[in-house]
Structure formats: C-alpha cells, structure tokens
C-alpha cells in the first residue's frame, strides 16, 4: 500500500556541514581501549605509549652475510700481506656472533686454506655488526599515545617483539537498508566498509534486508546504514531512527549526499547515508571519517599534498559544501565532476577537493590541495 505523501520522510531544512561536525565533536566520545596484537590494530589509535621492554638487539648480531672474526687478528692485513685467521666462522644476517668474533668480514674478503682463513683487508671492531641497543634502547617510546598505528609502525614493533598494544578500534555496523538486488548500493556498502577498516575501525557487516530498527540495536560502537534516506514509499531509515533514538540532522548541506542523516540510537552515533556510490563517497569523506576519528580518539591524519592550480573553473552552489573529484594533469589539477559523480569519474579520479559552503566556486588557477581517495 502506498504511503501518503504527508507521512513520508521529508527534509525541513538543510543543516550546514559545520553544525553537524560541531555536534559530532560535542557528543561522540572515544570508545574504550582494547588490547590486541599489532597486526590487528593497524590504523587504530593508541590508548597508551608503545614502549620497548629491553634493548634490541640484546646481543651483537651479524649485519651482513660473512665471516665472524676478531678484529685484532686482521690488524695490518692488506693486499700484499694477508693475515692468517686460526678461528673463523661463517655467519648469516641476524645471527648472534657470540664468542666467535667482534666483527664480520665480507665473504669475498676471506680465502679458506683448510680449516684456516686468509684475509687481505683489516677490519675494525664492530664492522658488519648490529650492536646491542642499536634498534632501540630499554624503555624507549616507539609510538606515542594518541597516534595512529601505521603499517611501518606495526612492522617495527612486531620486529621488536611487542606482542600486544592497547588501542581504540571502534566497531561500526555497516549494512544496506532494504532487500532485493541493488548492485550500486551493495558496492557502496562494501566501499564504506573498506574505508572504515582503512581508517582504523572494525567494520561489522550485516546483510541487506534486515529490519532497520534491528540494525540500530547494540553490540557495536556506531552504525552506518546505506539507503532508505530518501522520500520514496519504502524509505523509512530516518523514521526508524527517530522511533528508537534521536535524529540530530536530516538533510545535510553537502553535495552529493543531501539526504544524509545523523543521530543517536541506544547512545551510539548513527550515520544514515544515501544509497548512491557518489553520495556514499562524499558523506563518508565529509562526515563519516570525522565520526570515526572521534570514536577512536585520534586525529584524521590526512597526508599533506602540494597545492597545485586548477586547470578549469569549478562552479558551486552557495550554502552547499561540495565535494569535487579531480585528476592530476601535467599543468595542475583538472576537475572531473561535482554534484552528481558518475561511476566512470569515480574510477578515473586521483583525489578530491572541497568547495566551502560560502563560495560560489573556484576560478581557473586557484591553488588547491587534494585529498586522497580510500
């Protein structure tokens, strides 16, 4: 049965993006920290410093493949007078030297003569050796609380033997509202899940067709649902949020993605995202990642990029914060699409820029800094 127009979801006014972000900053709090292996904590925010338990390495290690030698035994060796090594042992990178020497000579520097060796170059103590404490000292701070764990951080602390870290890694339910086949909405939901994971969250995917109110239930730290935000007879995501929680904003002044909504259910933040891929992209980049940043108690570490000139004008509607897809070209940054972002443009884009709500657009030659696409 058709839903009467007066009973359908409708937007009274568009809420400025800055107001929504301010509300997120006021009402969304960091989640409790959890202890987990570093590999599972990639991208999350550290709740406490990662500190080395002891010096690394603890003993001298071979830094190159070669021969463990005592440096004093090579004193005076040169191309004309080889030194005879009565004690010699081959070692591989990372192998402890023990009592076999205090230096490592390159493999080609030694000629074997029975059980002895001849070396025609003098080496000094510590040459070819990774000395104790070189990688880190005891009690050294490897990564500070409040910082995100990058892939290089994870690799370094794993190599140093750190078994667990305390991090904030929010669990975010992500699902598509409504049943039936909808390849675009499914792709958008999968993309948002990947973006959550890349930004330090733990996406908890739920299949399409589930009841909206059930998706808004507990068990997670936040909820992001795609679809059901429009004005059609089956769109009910905003009404469902209002029934069990609060709607802080329905209709947000961003483009694309004007029918997005933000609120709370069971004290958990909820972001309702239009079911189009371009709208999902814009709403995630402009709102969703800020919400996730607050939940993980960190900062949005957007990599800095060189500002480059626009090669074409970008027109914009005053009052809307607009996301524009761009591509790097030889003489600067070329805008690809705004307002509606075609799927081909999404695949061809190198990044994105934002036109502020107060602006009518950006002229040719305006210098812009692009954001990276997840």
Image (tube, grey):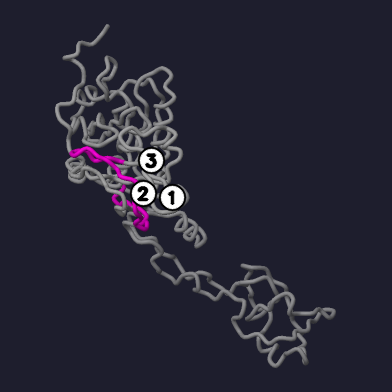
Estimate the x, y position of residue 177 in percent, counting from the top left.
34, 23
Q: Earlier in the sequence, mark 1 or mark 3?
A: 1
Q: Are marks 1 and 2 in contact (CB under 8 Å)?
A: yes
Q: Earlier in the sequence, mark 2 or mark 3?
A: 2
183 relative to 364 in the view: left or right? right
Identify the residue at horizontal 47%, vertical 60% (top origin).
157
* Residue 169 seen anywhere in this rendered image of the structure: yes
Estimate the x, y position of residue 189 in percent, counting from the top left.
39, 31
131 relative to 46 in the view: left or right? right
Estimate the spatial distance between the alpha carbons at disc 1 and disc 2, rounded to whole Å. 9 Å
Quadrant of the rendered image containing residue 271: top left
Q: Which residues are magenta?
A: 296-323
Pick whichever, 16 or 200, lies toward us.
Answer: 16
Q: Which residue is mark 1?
A: 329
Identify the residue at horizontal 30%, vertical 31% (top origin).
273
Q: Where is 223 relative to 353, above or below? A: above
Identify the residue at horizontal 50%, vertical 73% (top origin).
134
Pick whichever, 325 or 139, lies toward us.
Answer: 325
Screen quadrant of the C terminus: top left
Q: Which residue is mark 2?
A: 311
Please, what secondary structure does the residue beneath circle 2 have? loop
Q: Are marks 1 and 3 in contact (CB under 8 Å)?
A: no
Q: Is residue 277 magenta?
A: no
Q: Which residue is mark 3?
A: 336
The count of marks equals 3
């Amino acid at each position: 049965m058709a839903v009467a127009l007066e009973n359908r979801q409708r937007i009274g006014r568009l809420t400025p993006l800055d107001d929504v972000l301010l509300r997120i900053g006021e009402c969304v709090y960091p989640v409790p920290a959890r202890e987990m292996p570093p590999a599972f904590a990639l991208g999350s925010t550290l709740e406490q410093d990662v500190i080395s338990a002891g010096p690394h390495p603890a003993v001298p290690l071979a830094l190159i493949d070669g021969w463990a030698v005592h440096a004093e035994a090579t004193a005076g060796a040169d191309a004309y007078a080889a030194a005879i090594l009565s004690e010699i042992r081959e070692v591989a990178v990372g192998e402890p030297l023990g009592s076999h020497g205090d230096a490592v000579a390159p493999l080609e520097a030694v000629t074997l003569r029975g059980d002895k060796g001849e070396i025609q170059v003098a080496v000094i103590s510590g040459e070819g050796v990774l000395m104790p404490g070189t990688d880190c000292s005891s009690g050294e701070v490897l990564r500070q609380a409040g910082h995100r764990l990058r892939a290089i951080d994870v690799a370094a602390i794993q190599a140093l033997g750190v078994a667990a870290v305390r991090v904030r890694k929010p669990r975010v339910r992500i699902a598509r509202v409504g049943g039936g086949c909808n390849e675009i909405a499914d792709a958008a939901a999968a993309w948002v899940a990947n973006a959550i994971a890349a930004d330090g969250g733990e996406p908890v995917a739920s299949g399409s067709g589930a009841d909206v109110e059930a998706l808004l239930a507990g068990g997670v730290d936040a909820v992001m649902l795609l679809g059901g935000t429009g004005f059609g007879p089956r769109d009910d995501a905003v009404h469902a949020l209002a029934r069990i929680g609060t709607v802080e904003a329905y209709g947000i002044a961003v483009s694309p993605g004007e029918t997005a909504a933000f609120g709370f259910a069971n004290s958990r933040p909820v972001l309702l995202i239009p079911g189009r891929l371009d709208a999902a992209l814009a709403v995630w980049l402009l709102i969703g990642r800020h919400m996730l940043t607050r939940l993980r108690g960190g900062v949005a570490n957007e990599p800095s990029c060189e500002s480059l000139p626009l090669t074409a004008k970008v027109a914009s509607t005053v009052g809307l914060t607009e996301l524009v897809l761009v591509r790097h070209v030889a003489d600067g940054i070329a805008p690809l699409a705004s307002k509606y972002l075609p799927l081909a443009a999404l695949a061809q884009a190198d990044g994105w820029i934002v036109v502020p709500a107060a602006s009518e657009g950006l002229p040719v030659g305006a210098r812009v800094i692009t954001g990276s696409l997840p």
